[in-house]
Image (cartoon, rainbow, N blue to C red):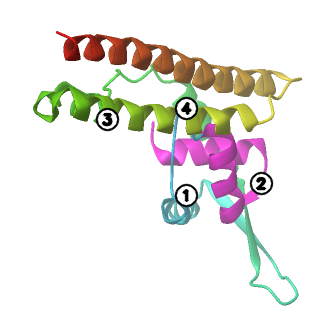
Amino acid sequence: MQLRHAVLGLLDIAPQSGYDLGRAFDGSVAHFWNADQSQIYRTLDRLEADGAIETETIPQQGKPDRRVHSLTDGGRAELAEWLGTPLEVLKPKEPFLARLFFAAPLGVEGVLQLLDEREAAVRAALDQLRALPAASGDLGAVLRAATLDAGIRQGEAELAWLRATRASVSDLEGS
């Protein structure tokens, strides 16, 4: 998946400004895809140059003009083509697990501190996910709710794994 596919998908839900897309990333897909505002604007520029989106400029009183982006037929076709392609092969990159894998030189105390730091990050992410409204209704809403549920379940599973790992590491301290 590329960022452009996530942007196309979000614009398929509703036309949005670049700012709105940033908020949509934070409030709907951040648990499986992230993008900062500058990446979003660069992607919008490329999509517009490629003819996948069109942009309407809406003048605003006392503020910069609002640029609202929507899919063109070409953008809908690109999104449909991507959705119809075979799934990408999993190629995970998990910086925390890489760090943990090599963390023995930190000693038990350092590893426990690393696990505490990760637990705090997972708890914060779970709090954000749990604060999102669960959509219901049409197929799109059901699928968005399912991805939210997946993010919550993954976070809860990681917390359980962190507890078990902490127990295993702590047992070494008493040895």
Disc ID at residue 15: 2
Percent position of residue 52, x then y? 60, 53
| Visible residue check, residue 74 | no
Q: Which residues are magenta?
A: 1-29
- Residue 122: in magenta span: no
Crowdedness near tag 2: few (<14), some (14–19) or many (≥20) residues, C-alpha within 10 Å: some
Reply above or below: 45 against 135: below
The picture quadrant where one finds residue 153 is top right
Crowdedness near tag 3: few (<14), some (14–19) or many (≥20) residues, C-alpha within 10 Å: some
Q: Amino acid at mark 1?
A: Leu
Disc ID at residue 47: 1
Residue labelled with disc 3: 114
Q: Of marks 2 and 3, which one's residue comes earlier in the chain? A: 2
Q: Of marks 4 and 2, which one's residue comes earlier in the chain? A: 2
Residue beneath the point at 56% across and 19% down: 156
Q: Amino acid at mark 4?
A: Glu
Residue beneath the point at 51% across and 15% down: 157
